[in-house]
Image: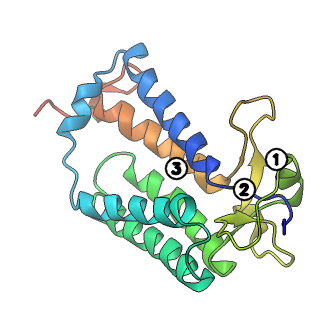
Amino acid sequence: VLSQPRADHRVEMIIGLAYLLVLASVPLLGGRITALADLPLRRPSLAVGAIAIQILVISVVPSGLPEAVSTTLHMSSYVLLGAFAWANRRIVGVPIVALGGLLNFIAITANGGVMPTDPDAAASLARQVPEGEFANSQVLPDAKLQFLGDVFATPASLPVHNVFSIGDGILLIGVFVLVHVACGSKIVPRRFVPAPA
């Protein structure tokens, strides 16, 4: 049985590629990538645990767990990420990342653990996902806070095509700010660049 078009785990691939592009832009803008090793991250195990949960639920066993369990785990991963962001809130860029994550969490919570996808954006995916698989993003008949959901779609001409939300965009901006400030890129005013450890 096939359901209506909806986003699948390839959205993580798109986000991963976007983060790689951010990293690739560092040396182009005069930054030093190795400076990321000097970031004073606190409680990194929270972020590692959250990412592991999302990979498990969305990519490894999307149909191997009861829906209620998958939904609970998915939402708990955002709680862990929020705790990680709070622990590192004094690092430049982290509050922006946290805002993006919070907007996604609000949309997901309002819709019972699933990110609502705009029907037009989902239709552009031109693919279907089997029923019974957990989908972190899908078209809902009575979506709440739809404007915070996956309402944008990447160009269909791209090899990896999917939908994304306002929160995802803010997350990416936050990562860009964090990475370029930490790495001392030329686009960052000197007063914001941390002194070498």
Residue at 66% of width from left, 53% of height from top? Answer: 166
Q: Is residue 103 visible?
A: no
Residue at 87% of width from left, 76% of height from top? Answer: 141
Contact (CB < 8 A) between labels 3 and 1? no
Q: Is residue 172 above or below residue 20?
A: below
Quadrant (top left/top right/bottom left/bottom right) for the C terminus: top left
**What is the x, y in percent for residue 124?**
86, 46
* Residue labelled with disc 1: 125
Instruction: Measure the C-alpha gap from mark 1 to mark 2.
Output: 8 Å
**What is the x, y in percent for residue 13?**
57, 43
Instruction: Say few, some or many: other residues with alpha carbon within 10 Å of mark 3 (under 14 / 14 to 19 / 20 or more).
Output: many
* Residue labelled with disc 3: 171
Q: Is residue 21 visible?
A: yes
Instruction: Measure the C-alpha gap from mark 3 to mark 1.
Output: 22 Å
Instruction: Measure the C-alpha gap from mark 3 to mark 2.
Output: 18 Å
Name the kind of residue labelled 3 in the image.
Leu
Name the kind of residue labelled 1 in the image.
Leu
Mark 1 and mark 2 lie on one chain; the one further toward the N terminus is 2
Tell me if 4 is positioned left or right of 68 in this view: right
Residue at 56% of width from left, 69% of height from top? Answer: 105
Name the kind of residue labelled 2 in the image.
Ala
Instruction: Say few, some or many: other residues with alpha carbon within 10 Å of mark 1 (under 14 / 14 to 19 / 20 or more).
Output: some
Contact (CB < 8 A) between labels 1 and 2? yes
**What is the x, y in percent for residue 121?**
83, 51
* Residue labelled with disc 2: 7
SS at circle 3: helix
Q: Is residue 183 above or below residue 123?
A: above
Mark 3 and mark 1 lie on one chain; the one further toward the N terminus is 1
SS at circle 1: loop
- Say how many tags the image has: 3
Q: Is residue 7 above or below residue 192?
A: below
